[in-house]
Amino acid sequence: MRAAYHEELESIGDSLVDMANLVTSAMGRATSALLDADLQLAESVIAGGDTVDDLQRDMENRAVAVLARQQPVARDLRLVVTSLRMSADLERCGVLAQHVAKVARRRFPDQAVPRDLRRTILEMGQLAQRLMAQAAEVIVTRDVESALQLEKDDDRMDELHRMIFHHLLDEKWHHGVETAVDVTLVGRYYERFADHAVSVAKRVVYLVTGEHADGLPADGCA
Amino acid sequence: MRAAYHEELESIGDSLVDMANLVTSAMGRATSALLDADLQLAESVIAGGDTVDDLQRDMENRAVAVLARQQPVARDLRLVVTSLRMSADLERCGVLAQHVAKVARRRFPDQAVPRDLRRTILEMGQLAQRLMAQAAEVIVTRDVESALQLEKDDDRMDELHRMIFHHLLDEKWHHGVETAVDVTLVGRYYERFADHAVSVAKRVVYLVTGEHADGLPADGCA
């Protein structure tokens, strides 16, 4: 009975890692679709959102079942409640990857990202992936130090986000309003994705230490 | 003991309603600050975010305490878990109201919203408030019909959001890129706020019927 219980708790953690891996991959493919104007890849990311939703729904049901049947207390209770929160973060990240892919689809066969911003968007996409891969690792290792490091690494995302605005508001901007709108939205999607990765890591800190790592991410935009 | 337990459950519901009322008011004031270029009002919305955070943190702690001490099952368990979810929606809405206020602050003493979009933004702001007020009512009444109605009413928000994009991408747009960026972000903030109101209402449907009202809101943007 207790063995099954611990297996259930572990399987909840496994599902979180699976979700984190899925959205990391989705964001990577969405970034490629965006920068290569690859419609097929964009469609695959958009269609893949259901898998994340299914995983989340399934994990939620198992978490509620554990609460009902096993009535965990103390640390185990905190684990289940925190997992529910993390799964909401991860589910949202799946939606954000889809949003990036939808921008690529909407502008196809044109490029949504002008040449002089490709490098910045590529870095945002790669950083988003790295942050989420790091968050997945933190879920497994429960390493508080690397969870806190994640927040520092996210500073670079804020910097890139500011660079985009700087670029948009430069008088030399000559890519028109439609591209400005797309770049504004895409920048926000990456920034929010990274915020959720930070949020997942902070929840692990809470889980391990019982203390909130100064609340939710700052959400620096606008 | 049981009386105290039911009081605790009720007080969790009360906190959710308080949070919903707070963010409804915050979004109303943020919209006024935006449309009137009122810096003082914008600052008050930005400063007020802490109150929402405090309410959420407090509610979360009480919810976890109820889970630990009372180990609710069945419907009561569903109530506590769903409340945790709803409080995350509402906390996010507080942040979105702050974001709208920050746009007003950044552009002060200028107007962030051009004249030909004032009416649309005003309607978005008012609709956002109405949807959240409706969601607060649904938390109290648990009326499934009006929860489902909320989703239909949100269609108008999507329509207004599309109108903004239509306007932005019109060749006659002559307000420049900075205003395009601000309007894009503001439109997204209202749309997300409304999505969260719909999400709160859907969670009430789940609470009452035990069935998910077709998952989370569609999040129509981009």
Image: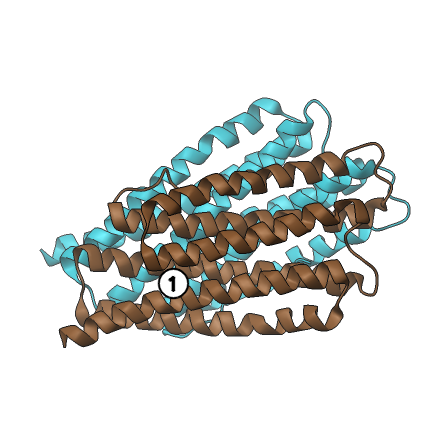
Chain colours: A cyan, B brown
> In this rendering, is residue B57 above or below B20?
below
Chain letter, disc 1 residue = A
The C terminus of chain A is located in which quarter?
A: bottom right
Say how many tags the image has.
1
Residue to which mark 1 is pinned: A142
Residue, x 40% and y 44% (percent of image)? A19
Would residue A222 be visible to someone looking at this image?
A: yes
Query: Is A119 displayed left or right of B77 in the figure?
Result: right
- Expressed as whole percent of the image width and height from the top left, the position of residue B104 reads 73, 62
Label 1, residues with CA under 10 Å away: few <14, some 14-19, many ≥20:
some
| Quarter holding residue A38 | top right
Q: Secondary structure at mark 1?
A: loop
| Quarter holding residue A122 | top right
Residue, x 32% and y 72% (percent of image)? B62
Query: Is B72 displayed left or right of B127 in the figure?
Result: left
Residue, x 45% and y 35% (percent of image)? A49
Q: Nearer the viewer, residue B145 or A15?
A: B145
Query: Is A57 displayed left or right of B183 in the figure?
Result: left
> In this rendering, is residue A212 above or below A110?
below
- Expressed as whole percent of the image width and height from the top left, the position of residue A61 reads 26, 47
- Expressed as whole percent of the image width and height from the top left, the position of residue B192 reads 55, 49
- Expressed as whole percent of the image width and height from the top left, the position of residue A190 reads 61, 48
> In this rendering, is residue B97 above or below A32?
below
Query: Is A140 displayed left or right of A135 in the figure?
Result: left
Would residue A214 be visible to someone looking at this image?
A: no
The N terminus of chain A is located in which quarter?
A: bottom left
Q: Amino acid at mark 1?
A: Arg
